[in-house]
Image: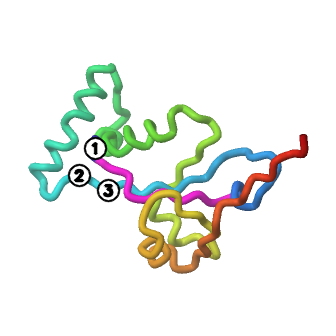
Amino acid sequence: MAYRVESVVIFGSYLKGVPHLNDLDLGVELIGKWNDDASYHSACRPSMERARSSGRRFRNVVDEVCWPRTEVLLLLKNRSRTISLCEWDSLKNMPELRYCVLVGDKLRIAEFIKDGRPVELPVAVEADP
């Protein structure tokens, strides 16, 4: 894979403890595994080869260039209708965002989401037997 998962936060209705969820909102930060143009092409080549060998067709050059990143997000989503992945950069513009860090450096994420409020995951309450 050309990218690795650096951070994952959960936000939205799951943190409110609603009884029935429509979706699970996750913000995922992906970091490229390259340092320069040559290593970028080397890192992306296997992803592009998998796409071509599986018969994937791209609508335009932007979709093709973005494919290595999209491939990782699709693997994380795993065809789930209930998982909603959010662009990482959009998290910093969400006012008073309540979030819980699942993966990553909590202090670095708090600096990134300056207007956010970190919270702990809700504790599930077990029904009486």
Left or right, 39 with respect to 97, comes to left
Q: Is residue 54 above or below residue 3?
A: above
The colour scheme of the drawn protein is rainbow
Residue topped by disc 1: 65
Q: Measure how far apart labels 1 and 3 are at the Cα level.
A: 16 Å
Q: Measure how far apart labels 2 and 1 are at the Cα level.
A: 15 Å
In the rendered structure, which segment of residues is drawn in magenta? Answer: 3-12
Q: Residue at x 50, y 64 (%)?
A: 90
Estimate how packed mark 1 is, as few (under 14), some (14 to 19) or many (20 or more) residues with alpha carbons within 10 Å.
few
Question: Quick one: SS at disc 3?
Answer: strand
Q: Which mark is residue 33?
A: 2
Check residue 41 for magenta coloring. Answer: no
Estimate how packed mark 3 is, as few (under 14), some (14 to 19) or many (20 or more) residues with alpha carbons within 10 Å.
few
Q: Amino acid at mark 2?
A: Lys
Q: Nearer the viewer, residue 80 or 48?
A: 80
The x, y position of residue 75, in whole percent, is: 43, 36
The x, y position of residue 44, in whole percent, is: 22, 41
Residue topped by disc 3: 31
Question: Quick one: SS at disc 1?
Answer: helix
Extreme residue in the front direction: 129
